[in-house]
Image: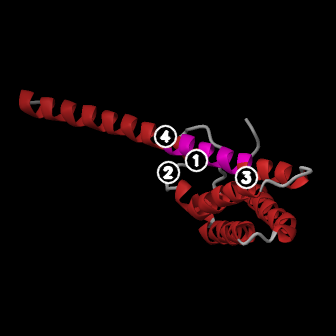
Amino acid sequence: MKPLARASGLLAAAAALLAGAAAADDIAGVIAARHDHFKSMGAAAKALTGELDAPALVVADVRRDATTLDALAAELPTWFPAGSGPDSGAKTRALPAIWTTPEAFAKDAKDLALAADRLNAAAADGRMDTLRPALAAVKATCKTCHDAFRGPET
């Protein structure tokens, strides 16, 4: 093999390895961000549950947490780009069904976004009597999606 061709081949191999490492870092970052988003959603839902069970309702807190849930729920479908599932080799609870049945995942994500939007509207309009059932609807959509698309802790 000629030295120039050999050097070109080595450079190409090195570039491929670096690209693979960068892609792995990108996927790890995507998965970490997704995890953080879900933790924020869970914290907001937990806070809302506590706020609705408190003796005195602090409307500003309810509105803040409902807005957080609404905003994050609308973004959820973007948290699962191709290559960020278990086939990436990274640790994730996301099941392959997210990518193999995208219509079902999109439907569940849309149902969550609609439920979160209704919850946020109830909080924004001051309809405190409808908050508890609206929060229950959000939690039900979370469970539906978790049952189909989230694996166990490993």
Q: Residue 83: percent from the left, percent from the top?
A: 49, 51
Q: Mark 4 falls on what kind of element?
A: helix
Residue 25 is a magenta residue: no
Residue at the image point whose x is 49% and y is 40% from the top: 29
Of the two numbered discs 3 and 1 in the rendering, the one whose residue sits closer to the viewer: 3
Other-residue count near label 3 (Cα within 10 Å), few / some / many at <14 / 14–19 / ≥20: some
Give the residue number, with chain letter if any, for mark 2. 83
Give whichever of 135, 122 is nearer the camera.
122
Q: Which mark is residue 34?
A: 1
Classified by dominant secondary structure, the portion drawn in magenta counts as helix
> Residue 93: in sight, yes or no?
no
Image quadrant of residue 3? Answer: top left
Which of the numbered marks, if any, corresponds to residue 29? 4
Q: Earlier in the sequence, mark 4 or mark 2?
A: 4
- What is the three-letter code of the residue carrying label 3? Asp
Mark 3 touching mark 1, by CB under 8 A?
no
Give me the C-alpha separation between circle 3 and circle 1: 24 Å
Task: Compare marks 3 and 1 and give the one earlier in the sequence.
Answer: 1
Q: Amino acid at mark 1?
A: Arg
Instruction: Indicate which disc, 4 or 1, sits on the residue closer to the N terminus.
Output: 4
Which percent across, then down, holds residue 142? Answer: 76, 59
Front: mark 4 or 2: 4
